[in-house]
């Protein structure tokens, strides 16, 4: 699949990153594009590829924060970055930019998520209307570790055994707002052990993607999740079973970063996680998040 060149647009290439039996559709690399200067036809091709492939990789970019924000805004209005774990609202000069970093300057972390594992999650799904897209741009990367993996939530729904798929339809799951994916407590939240009491948002467990029309699992994150109306033990057992299917390795694509990579994901139909890396190495990523709507039930 490749966009046709027009008089004003460069030819861009879109090529699959990998294929796997359960998730042959996840991920593509887009080549031949400088994200600082794309015309409408090129953007339309990128948008189509993003809907079709869920995660897009653009290598070799040179983006300032305003460049990153300007490309992001082509998808729609941006959400402000979440508050950092240390209470700092703005890690970079712009409130739309979320800094993901373990770097400490003058005793203060410049960003969020530290150097540990970031567990499987969807960005900001504790909100009623979570972002539809997120993009992460690599400014500094460690020599090893810190790879980011993506899981295909269309394939996850399809991978459920028939009885479980039927059961999942009609359920609602609580998306916890206590912890971020690095396991840090969000600013202003008093943690509790009971997911029913914790801040967060109920979303349908199976949703229909508003643009592709396909059905997908919508899980958010595992910690402190709760199936509405279930006892805690029963909810945990069913969620564990669903999560085992949803994060099976044949549904997953893992990205090894290079400086200048931008990865754009559909935050509705994918989850992502990050491997830990050496605490003494530096990793600096800048992220934007594009406003979305409440995920509709399937
Ligand atoms: C994010 C995120 C993981 C990473 O920015 O939303 O989860 O690889 N980042 O830094
Ligand atoms: Mn994330």
Image: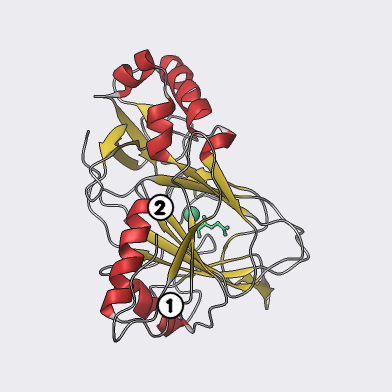
Badge 1 vs badge 2, beta-carbon distance below 8 Å: no
Front-most of residues 221 and 195: 221
Q: Secondary structure at mark 1?
A: helix
Considering only order in the chain, which callout, 2 or 1, is on the residue closer to the N terminus?
2
Q: How many marks?
A: 2
**Residue 285 in the image: x percent, y percent?**
56, 69
**Picture quarter with the N terminus:** bottom left
**Residue 111 in the image: x percent, y percent?**
56, 68
Direction from residue 146 to residue 250 in the image, left or right = left
Rendered residue at 51%/38% (across/down): 251
Rendered residue at 41%/41% (across/down): 220
Rendered residue at 41%/61% (across/down): 134
Up the image or down, 296 lies above or below 242; here it is: below
Q: Secondary structure at mark 2?
A: helix
Up the image or down, 180 lies above or below 29; here it is: above
Front-most of residues 229 and 117: 117
Residue 83 seen in render: no
The circle drawn on residue 53 is: 2
Q: Which quarter of the figure has residue 25? A: top left
**Residue 122 in the image: x percent, y percent?**
43, 47
Kindly report which numbered mark, 1 or 2, lies closer to the viewer in this rendering: 2
Label 2 Cα crowd, 10 Å radius (few <14 / some 14-19 / many 20+): many
Q: Is mark 2 within 8 Å of ligand 1?
A: no
Direction from residue 211 to residue 290 in the image, left or right = right
Mark 1 vs mark 2, CA separation in Å:
21 Å
Rendered residue at 30%/18% (across/down): 166
**Picture quarter with the C terminus:** top left
- Please give the residue where the numbered disc 1 appears in the rendered image: 68
């Amino acid at each position: 699949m490749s966009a046709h060149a027009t008089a004003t647009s460069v030819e861009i290439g879109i090529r699959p990153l990998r294929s796997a039996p359960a998730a042959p559709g996840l991920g593509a690399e887009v080549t031949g594009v400088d994200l600082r200067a794309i015309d409408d036809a090129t953007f339309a091709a990128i948008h189509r590829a993003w809907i079709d492939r869920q995660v897009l990789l653009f290598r070799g970019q040179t983006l300032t924060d305003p460049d990153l924000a300007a490309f992001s805004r082509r998808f729609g209005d941006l959400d402000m970055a979440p508050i950092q774990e240390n209470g700092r609202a703005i890690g970079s000069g712009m409130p739309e930019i979320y800094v993901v970093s373990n770097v400490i300057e003058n005793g203060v972390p410049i960003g969020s998520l530290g150097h540990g594992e970031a567990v499987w999650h969807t960005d900001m799904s504790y909100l009623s209307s979570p972002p539809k897209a997120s993009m992460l741009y690599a400014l500094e990367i460690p020599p090893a570790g810190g790879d980011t993996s993506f899981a295909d939530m269309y394939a996850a729904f399809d991978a459920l055994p028939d009885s479980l798929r039927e059961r999942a339809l009609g359920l609602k799951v609580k998306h916890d707002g206590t912890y971020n994916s690095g396991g840090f407590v969000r600013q202003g939240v008093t943690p509790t052990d009971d997911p029913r009491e914790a801040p967060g948002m109920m979303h349908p467990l199976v949703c229909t993607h508003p643009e592709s029309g396909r059905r997908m699992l919508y899980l958010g994150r595992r910690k402190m999740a709760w199936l509405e109306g279930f006892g805690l033990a029963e909810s945990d057992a069913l969620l564990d079973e669903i999560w085992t299917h949803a994060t099976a390795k044949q549904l997953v694509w893992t990205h090894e970063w290079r400086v200048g990579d931008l990865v754009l994901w559909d935050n509705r139909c994918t989850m992502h996680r990050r491997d830990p890396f050496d605490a003494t190495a530096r990793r600096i990523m800048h992220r934007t998040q594009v406003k979305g709507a409440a995920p509709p039930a399937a």
